[in-house]
Amino acid sequence: MFLFWNRPTHSARQSALHTRERLDQEFIEKLDQLHDGAIRTGLVTKADLQEAYRKSRDMQYNSSLSMWYTFGIMAFVVLLTPIFYETLTFLLGVKCFLPNNHLVWEATRPISDCGFCRNVDGPLILKNMSREELAPYAYSTLPIVIKNAVSHWPATSLLSLEMLKEIYGRYPEALDEDCHFLNFHSDLKSIRDVFNMSPERANLSVGSTWYVGFSNCHLGVLEELRKLYGRPHFLPVDAELSNIDYVFLGYEQGAYMHLDYIHRLMWQAQLKGNKSWILAPTPECDHVCQSFSFYVEPGDAVLVDTRIWYHGTSIPKGQFALTIQSEYS
């Protein structure tokens, strides 16, 4: 069975139009009769009906205004959000905008998946090993201590504050490089301040304790330093290494608890002195994870994903510690 839809003829359309006009007229007449009836009761006046109409019109007008006002706010937010985001991203990327923007970073860091710390109550401690032996752990979030991993480096016996001062003396422009400097709790504000210390202050005979860290981003300085230590033999052959290394040196206080806002995993070589580490999970993982501490000695290497583990360090009273740190991925 087939059904055909016939297009309405001109006479049919005319008939439908007349019917609609008749119904509209009947509705208007009934509405007028209702108004007249309401007025005849004496309970409703013509002024009342006019006032009701005016309020209805005003409500419709205000509703339209409210709708346009809401639409305007939404458009404003939609248009300005990308601009605000790009501006904030740019400002946070400018090193001098906030000398210490850890509060901003902490407030905007992603929530941790607590799998990285669940059932971890200490570092994995390994003996000096090859890259093949370390391969199963090299890119994990499990903290690792490799004993005597860098004892063979010339840096363990040769590198010192005095040698650093000599190397930078051969590249005086390096002191003015915009390299990252961390003074932690000390009163030293630059590498120049570190090298200008008197021998008595440097060895803690006088003055307060000091502990600093700085990146050696000058290519000449970096080349000189890397003559004293090579690529860590335990890292995977496909590991991409950073072209910037950090030096940490000083006494007692070490680094306060913090996260590192870096792009790669971290390795650190303990060249001189002993150091205690404390690791803690992110606050949202406190209910399933625990804090713990461990101790490293000269020649040990430490691998920690400092982007997710809060970490702090301290040095035994009266001891001088010197470490080299870098990143890999």
Image (cartoon, rainbow, N blue to C red):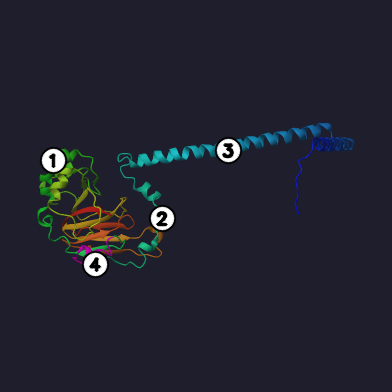
Disc 4 residue type (three-letter): Ile
Q: Is residue 136 on the magenta stretch? A: yes
3D distance between C-alphas at marks 3 and 4: 61 Å
Label 4 belongs to which residue? 125
The reply to whether discs 1 and 4 touch (Cβ–Cβ < 8 Å) is: no
Front position in the image: 125 or 197: 125
Label 1 belongs to which residue? 171
3D distance between C-alphas at marks 1 and 4: 39 Å
Q: Is residue 86 on the magenta stretch? A: no
Mark sitting earlier along the chain (4/2): 2
The reply to whether discs 3 and 4 touch (Cβ–Cβ < 8 Å) is: no
x, y percentage for residue 17?
A: 81, 36
x, y percentage for residue 327?
A: 25, 53
What is the secondary structure assignment of the residue under circle 2? Answer: loop
Q: Is residue 205 above or below residue 97?
A: below
3D distance between C-alphas at marks 4 and 2: 28 Å
Label 3 belongs to which residue? 71
Mark sitting earlier along the chain (1/2): 2
Magenta highlight range: 126-138
The reply to whether discs 1 and 2 touch (Cβ–Cβ < 8 Å) is: no
x, y percentage for residue 61?
A: 68, 34
Q: Is residue 43 visible?
A: no
x, y percentage for residue 104?
A: 37, 46
Label 2 belongs to which residue? 111
Please rate how many residues cluster around mark 3, counting C-alpha atoms within 10 Å: few if below 14, some from 14 to 19, many from 20.
few
